[in-house]
Amino acid sequence: MTARRLRASLKGWGGVGAMALALVVTAVFALLLPLSSARGDGSTGTGGQGVGQGIQARADTCTDPQDQSPSPSSDDSGETITAIKQRGYLSVGVDQNSYRWGYRDPNNTAKSSDLEGFDIDLAHEIAKDILGDPNAVRFHAIPTNQRIPAIKSGQVDMVVRTMTITCSRLKDVAFSAPYFLTGQQVLAPKTSDIKGYDETLAGKRICSAAGSTAYDKLSADKKAGALTASADITTTVPNQLDCLVRLQLGQVDAVVTDGALAASQAAQDPTVELKGKTFTHDYYGVAMKLGADDLVRRVNQVLVDYRKSGGWQASYTKWLSATLKADSPSATPPTAHYK
């Protein structure tokens, strides 16, 4: 479908629908030009250095994956951090079409080239700590299903992109301590008879992002019989926001994603809403290459300082408090426990 036809299909959704479209179109350009500089220098250099491989946690014995990260450290002498300092910038995989997390605001013409949002703030904070300059960071726009490959290939030093810490992912990447608590939730039109993650999903077409925690949960529950057998979960997309567009076009009946992301999408489009409560407890972490323990420990120290300084809370208030309820468990940073 061309952009013109898609805009015509979305006519009647108003400015919020146009916002979603603009963000999806931005994502397409991101795949064509995956690397952009926060400083606007146009460099296309890639980051990441080869490091020794190791297993952070065995998936078959893993419990509480959010507690498997090493203790914080401010040491600068490690191989990975030394390479980043010599290079002079931090290479970070992010989203650029998740409203209030990592996105380019099409209505903000004064800063149209700048990424902004909660995850972007954190990436700048890490760059400031390691390199002394919050703008010494170059962003890669990474689709949901390419987050782990981007880390393993060395395309990026880390991914800060609403990435849930799971036991299976610990086989492929290392994670920081958690920086955000959320859970899977259903998003559907306000007029829908869907009530939540329950029998009202019978016969419904459900969209999720390929490689996401949402799809893993849907697939596992379908096999275990915990999700109604007639629910159709075959619609998957590279980027999670694409599900919102599918929903707007009537191609699916519901979206399953992290509640925090779903709340931001509901803020974009007032014709949709969260249905029911979250049905999992998920923690976001900064993902890095296995074996890069010096970088992981340093990021954990950044998170400790970010919480203590009030930076985390200020970023939450700016970007997320308007879309999440005052009593949301996401309103304060999760407590960190280390292995």
Image: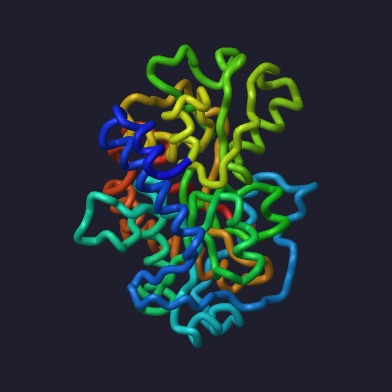
Q: Residue at x 54, y 75 (%)?
A: 47
| Residue 125: quarter of image | bottom left
Q: Please count the marks in the image.
A: 0
Name the foreground residue: 315 vs 135. Answer: 135
Q: Residue at x 51, y 80 (%)?
A: 84
| Residue 15: quarter of image | top left
Q: Position of residue 175 (x, y in %)?
A: 59, 58
Q: Position of residue 160 (x, y in %)?
A: 49, 58
Q: Residue at x 54, y 53 (%)?
A: 143
Whether residue 82 is situated above or below residue 275 in the rendered picture:
below
Which image quadrant: the C terminus? bottom right
Name the foreground residue: 68 vs 10. Answer: 10
Residue placed furthest toward the left: 110
Q: Residue at x 39, y 15 (%)?
A: 191
Whether residue 91 is situated above or below residue 254 in the rendered picture:
below
Name the foreground residue: 59 vs 245. Answer: 245
Q: Is residue 111 left or right of residue 242?
A: left
Q: Position of residue 267 (x, y in %)?
A: 32, 35
Whether residue 178 is situated above or below residue 260 in the rendered picture:
below
Q: Position of residue 72 (x, y in %)?
A: 53, 66
Is the image coloured rainbow, by chain, by secondary structure, or in one colour? rainbow
Residue placed furthest toward the bottom: 86
